[in-house]
Amino acid sequence: MLPPNIRTKIDALRKIQIDILNKEAEFHEQVHSVETDFQKSLIEIFDKRRQIVNGTTQEDTLKSEGHENNKTEDPLVKGIPEFWLRVFKMAPIFYGLVQPHDEEALKHLIDVRSILINEPKAGFVLEFEFEANDNFTNTVLTKRYEMECVPDVNKLLSFNGFKIFDTVGCDIDWKEGANLTVAVENGTERTVDSFFNFFCPKKLAANVDPVTYKKFMEYDFGIGYFIKDRVVPRAVLFYCGDFINVDDDSLEYELEQAQICD
């Protein structure tokens, strides 16, 4: 309904708006590259945490850093048993995801890492390292989140930086009769709730309608984002229960941040 001369000016302004968003996209990509470089400075710190959790740090080393132990060390206790299982059970985003039958396997989880990547797509990889256990032979289970930062000319208002592009899980090499994601009834296998479904989300959502599939993948991304930004860098705070009764709506916030490409 606008006069032609005004429409021409509005079209020009919309092109300028696209230029602005393209510049914002460049900014987000540069920030991701800086974060990717920055994570190298954290490797030594996270490795020190891993050694303490798994009992490979010598007691003399802890004492030299001012961490005195006033009680006699139990030689039978190595590191902090079931550290990551407790972290998962204390983190609100895992409520309902970690099932009772998952816990025995998760007792063997010895480290969780988040690695930012730029290739083949910008994103991050979650690595879950396990010691030998009775359920599967993998030593590391991975989940990769690939993202892109491209404004959609048809949805300019929705642009807010990176959106999920793809989610790539991994195959779990289950030992015979030890698959935690299935149950056998009358000779027929059926999928059951399990934390380990986290590593094959597409398979789990394969037979749902497009709207439900999109919501499911957004939820999956929210979980991955929460692990990367909250659980990995603040694991000891979850272990100690410091996040209990903290009114920051952590789960809701992370899910609001999760976006998925159409």
Image: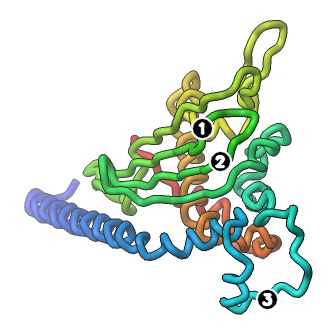
> In the figure, is residue 38 to the left or right of 61?
left
Residue 205 visible within the image:
yes
Q: Quadrant of residue 62?
A: bottom right
The residue that label 3 is drawn on is 68
The disc, 2 or 1, on the residue closer to the chain's N-terminal end is 2
The residue that label 1 is drawn on is 138
The quarter of the rendered structure image containing the C terminus is top left
Residue in the picture at 43% in, 76% down:
41
Q: Nearer the viewer, residue 218 or 233?
A: 233
The disc, 1 or 3, on the residue closer to the chain's N-terminal end is 3
Residue in the picture at 73% in, 33% down:
135
As measured in the structure, the alpha-carbon distance from the residue carrying label 2 to the one carrying label 1 is 8 Å
Circle 1: residue type: Asn
Whether tag 2 and tag 3 are in contact, CB under 8 A, the answer is no
Q: Quadrant of residue 234?
A: bottom right
> In the figure, is residue 123 to the left or right of 98?
left
Residue 249 visible within the image:
no
Q: Nearer the viewer, residue 52 or 114?
A: 52
Give the answer, above or below, for where 100 lies relative to 50: above
> In the figure, is residue 182 to the left or right of 12?
right
Mark 3 neighbour class, 10 Å CA radius: few under 14, some 14 to 19, many 20 or more: few
Mark 1 neighbour class, 10 Å CA radius: few under 14, some 14 to 19, many 20 or more: some
**Residue 39: which disc?**
none
Q: Nearer the viewer, residue 2 or 54?
A: 54
As measured in the structure, the alpha-carbon distance from the residue carrying label 2 to the one carrying label 3 is 29 Å
**Residue 130: which disc?**
2
Circle 3: residue type: Glu
Describe the element under mark 2 as helix, strand or loop: strand
Whether tag 2 and tag 1 are in contact, CB under 8 A, the answer is yes
Residue 200 image position (x, y, % from top left):
57, 34
As measured in the structure, the alpha-carbon distance from the residue carrying label 1 to the one carrying label 3 is 36 Å
Mark 2 neighbour class, 10 Å CA radius: few under 14, some 14 to 19, many 20 or more: many
